[in-house]
Image (spheres, rainbow, N blue to C red):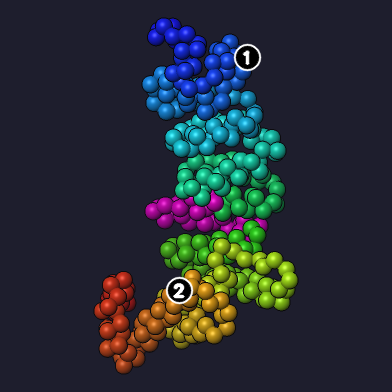
Amino acid sequence: MEKEKLSISSFAIKAGINSGTLSRFINGNQPLSVSSLDLITKAMKLEEGYFYSLYVNELTPNWRRLGPFIMRCAELGKLYCIDQAVDLIIDNPAYSSLLFDSAEALFHKGNREAALIIYKKVAESEKHQHAERLGLCQYRIFTCSLNSDQEHNLNCTIQFEAYIKRLPEGVQLDALKDLTNTLLSLNKWNKAKYYAQEMGRISRMLQKHNTNRPHRKPIEPAKPLFGYILYSDLLLGSIAADNDDYDQALYYLSCYEDQTWIVESDESSERTKEQFREWARGNRYLYELMKGNIEVLEPYIEYISSRKNEILRALFNS
């Protein structure tokens, strides 16, 4: 203001904030909100978040300011500031729920790096508890941490395994799906088989629970329960085939091929069922061929010739 020869009122107009608010901030009588700081920064023609590293050092443990500040830092990629801001309140258990909700909001927006910082700090603060929130944090840490480094992914898997049973049963199904897929990519067949079986067992148990107690609110994950049952059988069939047990693979194939027990018939469910039937058609040709049944060779060639995604797989298995 001195450099530009601006009065409080003229700069307040330039920034688009109340002159009284600006005056109280300058005189140290009122904390500055992150939204007002953004307006001041813009009026000074500086880049967004220019003062955040200074601002975080002046913040007090007040969620009204810290909450918006954390979300704004995430938008601008100021991850170091998020780390500092969370440290201000993480020792107070009253803030754990608020921090977790913020991490969830960031996760669902696709801002996983920022969310991961918060999940890790919440998990660390609750490591001696057995709350579902700790399990959920560890699940998010697992999915957010996976990358192209297989040794790193194996370590992530080992760390997460201890927490999977702490998850709510509905969420546990998605966690089992992600865990099994990761183990398959690591060629850990026995563990993948165990968790695929668990996914099938829990999804069938929940389906039975919902059928037998129609007056109760259904316990369901994000997707229809029948999808997890079919996917469990698909994975178990693939694991059997990878271990050259094609009779077992064909048994599991018949399980996800037979859909007469499924009651859902909406458009989304029909697409899901058709996808599994399509996988069953291709896999039946493949498993029969691998067993030595050359009679399926011609129809299998015809099948894969119209499906580009199947050609490489067929060549790999031939």
How crowded pointer 2 is (Cα within 10 Å; few <14, some 14-19, many 20+) is rated as: few
Q: Say the numbered circle drawn on residue 295.
A: none
Q: Earlier in the sequence, mark 1 or mark 2?
A: 1
The quarter holding residue 308 reads bottom left
Q: Residue at x 47, y 64 (%)?
A: 181
Task: Point out residue 66 in the picture as x, y percentages from the top left corner.
Answer: 59, 31
Q: Which residue is mark 1?
A: 29
Task: Point out residue 211 in the picture as x, y percentages from the top left corner.
Answer: 68, 76
Task: Point out residue 291 in the picture as x, y percentages from the top left corner.
Answer: 38, 87
| SS under mark 1 | loop
Asked if 205 appears above or below 53 in the picture, the reply is: below
In the rendered image, residue 141 lying in the magenta stretch gets the answer yes
Q: Residue at x 27, y 84 (%)?
A: 302
Tally the marks. Answer: 2
| SS under mark 2 | helix
Asked if 71 appears above or below 146 in the picture, the reply is: above
Picture quarter with the C terminus: bottom left
Magenta stretch: give its range.
140-166
The foreground one among 294 and 143 is: 143
Q: Residue at x 63, y 14 (%)?
A: 29
Q: Which residue is mark 2?
A: 271
Asked if 232 appears above or below 248 in the picture, the reply is: above
The quarter holding residue 312 reads bottom left
In the rendered image, residue 92 lying in the magenta stretch gets the answer no
Picture quarter with the N terminus: top left
Task: Point out residue 117 in the picture as x, y percentages from the top left corner.
Answer: 53, 41
Q: Label 1 vs label 2: CA separation? A: 61 Å
Three-letter amino acid code of the residue under disc 2: Arg
Three-letter amino acid code of the residue under disc 1: Asn
